[in-house]
Image (cartoon, grey):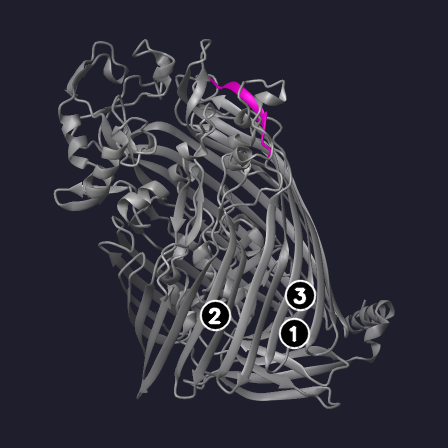
Amino acid sequence: MHKATKRGFIRLLLLLFFPLGAFAQEVQVNGQILDAQTGKGLSGVEIRLPTLTFFSNDEGFVDFKANIGQSTQLVITIFKSGFQEKQVTVEPQGRNRVNLGTLKLESREGRDALSAEEFVPVVTLSENDLDSDGDQNVSGLLTASNDVFVSAASFQFSFTNFRMRGYDGQHNELFFNGIPINDVETGFPGWNLWSGLNDVVRSRTASVGLAPNANGFGGLGGITALDVRASHHRPQLRVSYAASNRAYRNRVMATYSTGLTASGWAFTVSASRRWAQEGYIDGTFYDANAYFIGVEKKLNDNHFLSFTALGSPVQRGRSAPATKEMYDLAGSNYYNSFWGYQNGEKRNARVQNTHQPLAVLRHDWQIQEKTRLTTAIGYQTGRNGTTALDWYEARDPRPNYYRRLPSYIESDQAVEVEKLLRENESLRQIDWNYLYNVNRANTLTVNNANGIPGNSVTGKRSQYVIEERRFDRSLLSFNSNIESSISDLAKVSGGVSYQQQSNHNFKTINDLLGGDFYLDIDKFAEFIDTTGGGSFIQNDINTPNRILKKGDQFGWDYTNEHRRYNSWAQMEFYLPKFDLFVSGSVGNTTFWRRGNVTNGKFPENSGGDAPKQSFLEWAGKAGLTFKADGRNYFMLNAAYMVQAPQVRNAYVSPRTRDQVLPGLSTENITSIEGGYLLRSPYLKGRLVGYYTQIKNQNRINNFYLDNALIEDDGTASGGFVNYTMSGINTQHAGIEFGLEWAFSPGWKASTALAAGQYIYTSRPTIGVYLDNLASKLREDVAYIKNFYVPNMPQTAGTIGVSYNSPKFWFANINFNYFDDIYLDFNPDRRTVTAVAYVATPEFSNQVVEPGSPLWKTIIEQEKAPAAYTLDLFGGKSWKIRDIYLYLNVGVNNILDKKDFITGGFEQYRFDYGGKDVNRFPSNYFYSYGRNYFVSLALRL
């Protein structure tokens, strides 16, 4: 079919089905966007309509068509990271073409310069997460946009671990220079890959929720795409210094970019260093560097080739949550049990050490004027480890171990213990000298060492060591997307992707703490096999009684292998009164466990490749936007998704064996959203409601349980257990509201509100396995229906006022409110066993009286108190000849509220006999008190 004939046919077909648009006005809009400083055209400037986005070309020119319905006005937002946003009102007055002329964008070195690392978002962990890599649910600030609600969620709400719509990070897709960057194993975006590279990661596009996006199908929470190609950075030399009292105290950064030169080359390099001998919390430290190099070549007018490499090596001392008792004894809500004095210096036992550099090669092909193909391949590898104390045949060295606290001690000694802990700081911290002295005094002979008959090794066997738990990742990613405007009224996009990831999980000896060696045996297995030296207790039966030195691997050693294929397609239609889209994706995820050692407890199913687990994934979504006029829009989107389970919740105990969770299957997601968008010269608003169901989720925890084994005589003993929950369903419903009012030149008032209800809607099945034998100790039902998804504010609001002076300074102040923060709970407290006085109750008097105060204390989920904060941001810029100076200041929590509980968790322990919930109290996280960030930047 001839091109013109085809276009006319599509127009006729769409008008037949949507006659309301027949009398609407279509306007051709063009113009040029310039950098106010250099006078050069700005490429990649976003021209945003409420439902559509266009971009300027390499010279800054824009040319697009907009349907304004019956309205006499259309409000257009012009946006580019690092520049002040501009709004233009188009008034055609009967014309079908409007020239915007030349528009200049001024530099904005304000709040945009304060990105994720400055705000230091809270990392919320459960009790089990304290033994993992800890990269859970980190609030990502790079999703900030000109949407007033999204901006508030990214800045004002971020430090509370606020999650839009209550979704985990796995439901937000992140693309970096054209490749998907979410961790295949956990699903979480890798924001930490480029920490410290603020200058070069500002250019991004974002879609929220189920909206269409040309980068991919998207997750429940939407897509964020970073474009860091060298040609997309403004030509500049920028040097800055920052001081803060948050995670780090000092930061220096330098960035140089050539822009696209006349020869068709573009180069960008950036580097930074951040450090602190001690951060906001006692015993923490920060030592980090970052580097970036970007090279791009314009091969001709239709082909661009770019290469990007970056990395961010970070070492930081971590902090721990604590019980209210320990915070009170320390006299501070920032008590940290992970450190102690050694030779007069503070030493932290939990040090995270990460460096996972990433390289991406990308090709852009402008096939035709309105058809573009983007293909990228990336590779990432490196280390991710966290140290921790380990011990053998020795007392628990943790200073906050519950058995030594006054609340656990039932004798008269409790009062004296409380006094000592309150008055002597050293008793509340790790006693490094004691650990060294114990190791130096423990001389032992190991027979048949390293599996060699007759080989005897005598020396100081460490009873305490520092181990490093490693989670090293290698990820190969390929992605190719095509986008084509097949007519003025329709656009098609789609793509294919492939990801291959290997996650190597193992431990190494980091420090023998004065000893000569450690032994590679399972201390928990000795509770069952007391023969000593038998194969049952060996972590690796191929090398029994292995002598360990510093740097040696030991304990568990396995690799999770992943392969993921995906393809997607999307069709968008732009009609005079309606915009609509339909999108679909299909793919496959396969994973398996590879044991790198053969464990003595499970010689048959611990070493080698396990059977592959393969899952078909598919999804579809569609949406409709009604354009009442150029300012008022109504939208409705819906989606259904089938996703593979996560490997971390697929194996009952991946550290020791390849046992798969019974009944493992895909997760099913249903979601709908709808709302109203307002765009006018002085008002921007958004009111969206959403409803989502996520079904058939699993969760697996591994921990030491005090009453794991019940003997015939009724006595209980401890053991390491695998605790599984299957059949978890959650429901996420709520509204998002944002409004911005430019009520006077330079002045703006804004407000945002997130009001949600994120709850569990099922009663999952609990399975408890004794890890040493893989035997199922019991099966139970967790009565958690209508419990709240924990550790985030389900209600968050802010109201603020800002002023931008024509004399190049700005200031804004925000009052923020947070409520409905619920703690993570122990499912075992929500079982029949927890509220019964006998193992199998048959009569009502054998159960705690339903509805009684004791019943409510055991069953009900703990809620943190509501809280509020006050934040202030400001800045000033100066021009001295061709030099620009920028001063930015941010102060969070001006009122210095130090009692703001942002989350926490119950212990996986419970007093089944006495029903005393205070015997094992909850652990809490507190937000920082007053904290600041000040930066001074120079730009040429």
Among the 4 quarters of the image, the one containing residue 460? top left
Which residue bears the numbered disc 1? Answer: 678
Residue 432 falls left or right of residue 269? left
Query: Can the viewer see residue 503 in this picture?
Result: yes
Who comes first in sequence, dot 1 or dot 3? 3
Where disc 3 sits, the SS reads strand
Image disc number at residue 484: 3
Could you tell me which residue is drawn at 35 percent across and 13 percent down? Answer: 535
Horizontal side of 317 relative to 608 (left or right) equals left
Q: Is the magenta stretch mostly helix, strand or loop?
A: strand
Q: Where residue 110 sits in the image (x, y, percent)?
A: 40, 74
Residue 260: image quadrant is: bottom left
- The x, y position of residue 422, in whole percent, is 24, 42
Amino acid type of the residue tagged 1 in the rendering = Leu
Q: Is mark 1 on a helix, strand or loop?
A: strand
Q: Give the range drawn in magenta.
A: 773-783
Given the image, on which type of amino acid does mark 2 rest?
Lys
Q: Does the magenta stretch include residue 780?
A: yes
| Label 3 or label 2, whichever comes before in sequence order | 2
